[in-house]
């Protein structure tokens, strides 16, 4: 089990108090990493950091706005000053502003989402990589989606009025591609870069079988017969962040209960 330990490592999680982010932050902290929980909602990040500290973990909260390059530069400088290094970067934050079907998508909404999902993620990675390259060690994990490997299955939404926005699919495919580019380019510096593509997520069982058409349709379509729960992302992140995956880079780990098998 020592292969999975992250003692003495410093991990940054963007969107670190969000739906998946909170579980990613907790998993890395439980594996022994010092975790920097980052997002625009710094109060929520601090609440999570305090909870983790109360459980004996090393966790801090710092503000980060991926839509603002000055905020990105300030965040990286603060983290390096406070922690000395960044060993693990988890690019988890995502903006859902303006996500819509093609004919409802407007330039402003697309640009607002892309400012965070594409440009901001790239700029943060660019700001973190030099310190990793100098130490010849680092680990980057990008949180993509099954929308980054497949087109949306629109009939699953039924008559719920929900959809999967075109910018989201565009971004998540791009994130998988960026993962492979980074892995190939920075491999000689011993920097590993991988991504995780989760399937549908039912946070804390919020969607109920009896009255949610989308959930019923999704479960029928998934070999394991359920959506991801709160713990499913934890093992995948710790695995890719740890020495247990030391010879894996450029890989997109699909975590979807078999959804993409069909």
Image: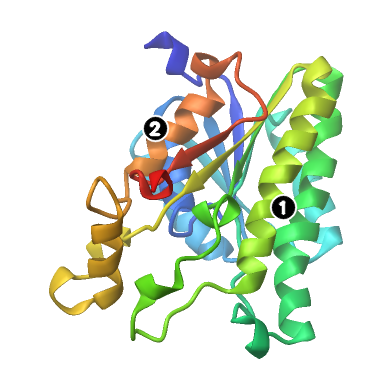
> Could you say which disc has been placed on residue 52 in the image?
none
Q: Residue at x 48, y 77 (%)?
A: 163
Above or below 229: residue 115: below
Q: Residues within 10 Å of mark 2 (few under 14, many from 20)?
A: some
Q: Circles 1 and 2: CB distance less than 8 Å?
A: no
Q: Quadrant of residue 127?
A: top right
Could you say where residue 45 lies in the image, as x and y percent from the top left? 51, 56
| Residue identified by numbered label 2 | 235
| Residue identified by numbered label 1 | 174
Q: Residue at x 61, y 61 (%)?
A: 94
Could you say where residue 186 lies in the image, as x and y percent from the top left? 81, 25
Report if residue 30 is visible in the image: yes
Could you say where residue 190 lies in the image, as x and y percent from the top left? 75, 16
- Front residue (pair 137, 49): 137
Earlier-in-chain disc, 1 versus 2: 1
Q: Residue at x 59, y 14 (%)?
A: 246
Q: Quadrant of residue 261?
A: top left
Q: Secondary structure at mark 1?
A: helix
**Is residue 116 left or right of 127 when viewed as pictured?**
left
Above or below 3: residue 174: below
Q: Quadrant of residue 130?
A: top right
Above or below 231: residue 241: above
Report if residue 52 is visible in the image: no
Distance, label 1 to label 2, CA atoms, is: 24 Å
Q: Tell me how many marks there are.
A: 2
Could you say where residue 169 lies in the image, as x and y percent from the top left? 62, 63
- Front residue (pair 152, 13): 152
Q: Secondary structure at mark 2?
A: helix
Q: Quadrant of the N terminus?
A: top left
Q: Residue at x 13, y 74 (%)?
A: 210
- Front residue (pair 63, 223): 223
């Amino acid at each position: 089990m020592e292969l999975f330990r992250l003692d003495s490592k410093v991990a940054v999680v963007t969107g670190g108090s969000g739906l998946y982010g909170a579980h990613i932050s907790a998993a890395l902290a439980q594996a022994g990493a010092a975790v920097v929980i980052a997002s625009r909602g710094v109060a929520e990040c601090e609440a999570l950091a305090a909870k983790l500290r109360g459980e004996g973990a090393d966790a801090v909260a710092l503000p980060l706005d991926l839509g603002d390059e000055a905020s990105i530069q300030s965040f990286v400088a603060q983290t390096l000053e406070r922690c000395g290094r960044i060993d693990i970067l988890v690019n988890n934050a995502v903006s859902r502003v303006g996500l819509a079907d093609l004919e409802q998508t407007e330039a402003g909404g697309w640009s607002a989402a892309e400012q965070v999902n594409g440009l901001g993620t790239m700029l943060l990675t660019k700001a973190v990589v030099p310190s990793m390259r100098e130490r010849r060690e680092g680990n980057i994990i990008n949180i993509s989606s099954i929308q980054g490997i497949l087109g949306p299955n629109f009939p699953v939404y039924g008559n719920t009025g929900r959809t999967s926005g075109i910018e989201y699919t565009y971004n998540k495919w791009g994130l998988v591609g960026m993962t492979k580019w980074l892995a190939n380019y920075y491999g000689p510096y011993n920097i590993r870069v991988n991504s995780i593509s989760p399937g549908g997520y039912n946070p804390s069982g919020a969607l109920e079988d009896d009255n949610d058409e989308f959930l019923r349709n999704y479960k029928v379509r998934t070999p394991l017969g359920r959506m991801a729960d709160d713990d499913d992302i934890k093992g995948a992140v710790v695995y890719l962040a740890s020495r247990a995956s030391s010879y894996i880079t450029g890989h997109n780990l699909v975590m979807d209960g078999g959804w993409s098998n069909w």
